[in-house]
Amino acid sequence: MTYRFPDEFWWGSASSAPQMEGASRRDGKSDNIFDYWFSIEPERFHQGIGPAQTSTFYDRFEPDIALLKQLNHNSFRTSISWSRLIPDGTGEVNQQAVAFYNSVFDRLLAEGITPFINLYHFDMPMCMQARGGWESRDVVAAYVRYAGLCFELFGSRIKHWFTFNEPIVPVECGYLGHFHYPCVVDFRRAVTVAYHTALAHAGAVKAFRDAGACGEIGIILNLSPTYPRSDTAEDSQAARWADLLLNKSFLDPALKGSYDPELVALLRQHDLLPEVADGDKAQLMAGRVDWLGINYYQPRRVKAKEQACSGAPRTPEDLFDFYEMPGRKMNPHRGWEIYEKGVYDILTELRLGYGNPRCYISENGMGVEGEERFIGPEGRVEDDYRIDFIRGHLEWLHRASQEGSACCGYHLWTFIDNWSWLNAYKNRYGLVRLDLASQVRTIKKSGYWFAEVARNHGFN
Ligand code: BG6
């Protein structure tokens, strides 16, 4: 069977400023929360490797963009670092950062690679976190100013924008899961953080439109379909709550400009609603996007709790449990499920339930621990498992497109193996292997395969 995609389909990969730039304390950049956190608790990070140890894109972007070209990318996503562009969060623009980003964008464009630019990838400037982070409305205003400056400074080059990557992650990991800085576990504060992030997103979209900027603006959401263990009312309800809290809490404002009434009722029932100010409703409505990025890695399998939580829930997981479905297909090199049809289910739900918005798969990828085991005699990683992974997802994407989905592209996570938050280099995702010590890059087997798919706009 032939899987052929339209000629204008976007092929490429994604990364982010904090995960690949390096130069984390150079040329005027201030600390983001991960730079700061590493300076006080390095033992939290896998093998003690912090955000300064990257593939140093800041210094090597020219050869790296040549590599992107060799991989036949017609597009590439990265982000702008707020703490590099405006080191004190609200004040002067750092001209060295402007020069750097302009050089990167010019280089990409010169190579025929369309830059997709995201404004925020978990990397709150530490000075803004010290002022309350997303719990503070002042930080929302500061973010909207930062976004407006980006449109002004880079709008002549950038036509494809995103406000946030996976905004639910800082909520889940930073305010519910004790996994990311500031390591708070507090459902009420988490809801406020999510609400303010949605307002910040909407404020940036409004600023984009008010400025008459040309191009399109969206948000990147990690959508994980929630499948109930059984069709009992209890399991179905549990899966519905997980979906509302973890997917719909950002999806609905982004596409409909408002929240699902069932989510609002659930939060009200547990006295978790955030403070709402005059004008918020209109702002959320103004934040509806032109297009959507979808990050898809794995689904969530959900079951009802054995014992319903008696008091107020402390985290969403007091309302439902995740469970390991027997027989599910696993990535043997990292404990995540592989369920390729999930991509089809997401696209179908968007088509039937949300008016078929223009969207693309902005991240999908396979993390592998100890990937050096797969380096073959030619010195490259023989990652047939990654080729199978990508192919499986593209087959389902193709099917969704045949049925009418408005999905217009596929980006793999990631280009070169990159530094990833607490996991550092534990799980490798790249099309290109990075030797961190020597900084040597070697295209993996999947990189050559993906380059052919991108060149041919499909595969057999
Ligand atoms: C994605 C994030 O969800 O997962 C990336 O957008 C991250 O920033 C990637 O690096 C992989 O995460 P991990 O924990 O497997 O390294």
Image (tube, helix red, strand yellow):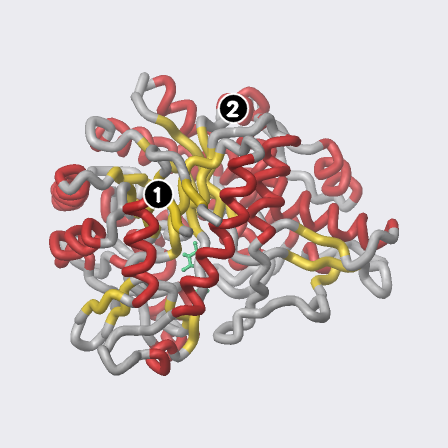
In this image, 363 relative to 153: left or right? right
Question: Is 64 on the left or on the right of 374, as rendered?
Answer: left
Residue 269 quadrant: top right
Report helix, strand or loop for mark 1. Answer: loop
Asked whether residue 88 appears in the rendered view, the answer is: no
Looking at the picture, how far across and down is residue 313, in whole percent?
Answer: 75, 55
**Residue at left offset 24%, top offset 53%:** 71
Q: Residue at x 25, y 69 (%)?
A: 434
Residue drawn at 17 percent across, 37 percent down = 109
221 up-or-down from 393: above or below = above
Q: Earlier in the sequence, mark 2 or mark 1?
A: 2
Observer-nearest residue: 64 or 188? 64
Farthest-out residue, front: 1
Mark 1 neighbour class, 10 Å CA radius: few under 14, some 14 to 19, many 20 or more: some
Residue 283: mark in rendering: 2
* Front residue (pair 324, 148): 324
Q: Is residue 271 visible?
A: yes
The x and y percentages for residue 158 are 25, 32
Q: Is residue 64 above or below residue 178?
A: above
Q: Residues within 10 Å of mark 2 (few under 14, many from 20)?
A: many
How many numbered circles are shown?
2
Q: Which residue is mark 1?
A: 457
Q: Of helix, strand and loop, which one carries label 2?
A: helix
Q: Quadrant of residue 93?
A: top left
Image coordinates for residue 438, horizontal then vertical, percent? 16, 75
At 13% from the left and 56% from the top, the residue drawn is 63
